[in-house]
Image: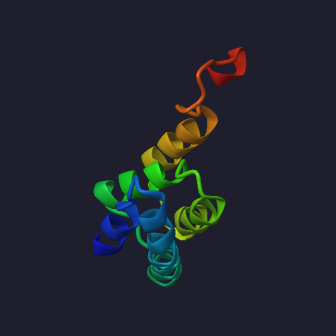
Amino acid sequence: DVLSKALAVKSDDAAQATAQKPVRWQCARSLSQIFQKVKVAPSKEVFDNLKKQLLDGDVEIEAAVGEALGNAELTPAQRLELQHHRRVNSKRETRTPDDE
């Protein structure tokens, strides 16, 4: 829970965001390793934080978060929600027929 909250903290200031990146990346990697060893479903709060970070804008953070989600034992409902979240990118201004 603490790791996912630390991962979610990203400054709007570019210099601060750059300084935060190694810590945020390590939080995602740590979550990935925990999920790999423990094999449990993340809590709703942790899952929601990870899901939001999939659209972080930094490829390295997004990849580490994707690995964490891949190592987690997601519930069927979480899998479905994640699949829908990945297919329908909310940052895109227009949608295509394939999005529905």
**What's the residue at 47%, 75% (across, down)?**
35
Residue drawn 58% across the image and 68% down it: 64
Q: Position of residue 32 (x, y in %)?
A: 52, 75
- The picture quadrant where one finds residue 65 is bottom right
Q: Residue at x 63, y 63 (%)?
A: 63
**Residue 27 in picture, x, y percent from top left:** 44, 76
Q: Is residue 56 left or right of residue 7?
A: right
Identify the image quadrant of residue 9.
bottom left
Q: Is residue 75 above or below residue 27?
A: above
Report whether 49 appears left or right of 96: left
Quarter of the figure with the N terminus = bottom left
Q: How many marks?
A: 0
Residue 66: % across, % down:
59, 61
Residue 66 in the image: above or below residue 1? above
Identify the colour scheme used. Answer: rainbow
Quick one: 46 or 75, which is closer to the camera?
46
When the figure is inspected, residue 34 is found, relative to residue 69, above or below; the finding is: below
Q: Position of residue 25 (x, y in %)?
A: 52, 73
Closer to the camera in the image, 35 or 63 = 63
From where the camera sits, is residue 23 visible? Answer: yes
